[in-house]
Amino acid sequence: MALSRRKMLKRAAAAGGAVLSPQVVTGQAPAQLTGTQTGRRFKAFVRHGTGASVEELKLRAIQPREVLVRTQASAVCYTIVGGALATTTVQQASIPNHSGMGVVEAIGPLVKRVQVGDRVVVPGTPQCGVCYQCLHGRADWCQFLDTAPAHPMAEMADGTQVFEGASLGGLSEIMVVPEEYCCPVFTDLPAEQLTLLGDTVGTGLAAGRDLVQIEPGWNVVVQGAGPVGMGAIQTARLANAGQVIVIEPIRARREIAMKVGGTIALDPNAEGNGLIAKIHNLCKGITDRRFAGGRIFGERFLAVPDGADFVINAVGSDWFPPKVEAGPDPTAILPLQQCFDFTRAGGHIVMLGVAWRGNVSFNAAQFSNRGRTFYSGQQGGLNMLRDIPRYVKLIEKGVIDMKSMITRTYPIERTREAVQDVADRTVLGAVITFS
């Protein structure tokens, strides 16, 4: 006679043990069930002591709600270069970066989101789906980010405990992450393209859809044509923006920006103090007629307002002096100030840059009465479980260009070189690939 699940659980409790049905065991990683992942050897780029180097590590036991991912690719983000290349002493050895993608090789017994064999993108921001922020439409501010357990995932040869930066690292042959960081993707797209969806390009793609939806015909300004800005340029193109005006000091990046959707690319160094007037002139409204026609009889204030409808700021401060054309302000405060002045009354501003050094001020009357709306970007508002599969389909269709976003790939042994190239800004997208 078959036993009900309730009776099985009662008998297990009475016996002081647990009863696992075959369905529970099926699909879980044999290595996790037998514990053979513990002690596994792998390579990772580790920041330790006063420097950073590629080290062989020994894996510690994974936790019940964690996922072991064999990394296939990890894009180096500019925001990590200051810490990764620093020579100050660190108290805790860690694996830098905050995104990656790969294949699930083992899961803890409580994991539900993914299964062994899944390809997953691991973004810099988790999505638990049940916290206050997730339930109020801001999964990019998922509160699991602040509560994710911090414990060592591996050990160096001398026994030094190694942690993962931002709870996931990335510059490693293995990532061990809470399941809240995993987004399964069902595609055979190259890993080096998919990994860009976990942070840089994915952030820019989200910026024009998740916090503000770009409307057809809008004048859009994108400040900064790094990987984040390139994503923003493409999302503006996909939304049929009327103009996509790119502001970028590096000539090579301006050229790529025009290839992927920019309509005009400006050098802020060449424009100098005339940049704000240039933007307003490019976005100039009809001054003697209403927007949809009709005579105004001199009431100019009824005309289309000058300025961009939407400005996306994707400029960060310089961790190191670039080895290419430098921008006009290494602190990145000037572009942040300018984005306010670029924007028309009633327009929108999304800020995606990081590591600004200093303060910014706005005219109080304009800040209060001109109707501009500011959005703090945090991955551009990315809702990763919804958006990343959507972007995968668009890459497959060829409407999102990921190939142009990658200018160089590196094996793990050349990770330091990759980080340095990103710091020097001599590459657009630097991706570590793993065999």
Image (spheres, rainbow, N blue to C red):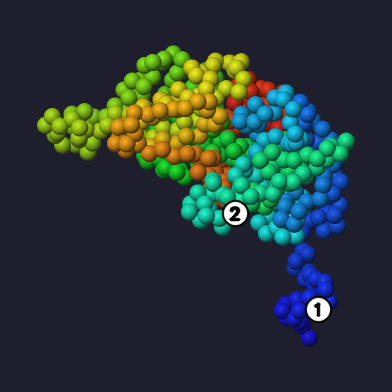
Q: Which mark is residue 14?
A: 1
- x then y, percent, for residue 60: 82, 47
- Label 2 neighbour load within 10 Å: few <14, some 14-19, many 20+: some
User: Residue 136: x and y, percent?
Assistant: 48, 54
The amino acid sitting under disc 2 is: Cys
**Which residue is painted at 62% across and 41% down in the image?**
124
Mark 1 residue type: Ala
Q: Quadrant of residue 271?
A: top left
Residue at 54% across / 31% down in the picture?
A: 354
The residue depicted at 42 percent of the width and 26 percent of the height is 337
Quarter of the image that includes the C terminus: top right
Q: Nearer the viewer, residue 267 or 261?
A: 267
Image coordinates for residue 287, horizontal then vertical, percent: 21, 28
- In this view of the protein, which residue sits in the foreground, 80 or 289? 80
Badge 1 marks a residue whose secondary structure is helix
Q: Does residue 87 sit above or below 114 in this rendering?
A: above
Q: Residue reaching furthest left?
A: 297
**In this figure, what is the number of numbered marks?**
2
Name the residue: 65% across, 26% down.
Answer: 82
Residue depth check, mark 1 versus mark 2: number of the one nearer the observer: 1
* Residue at the disc numbered 2: 128
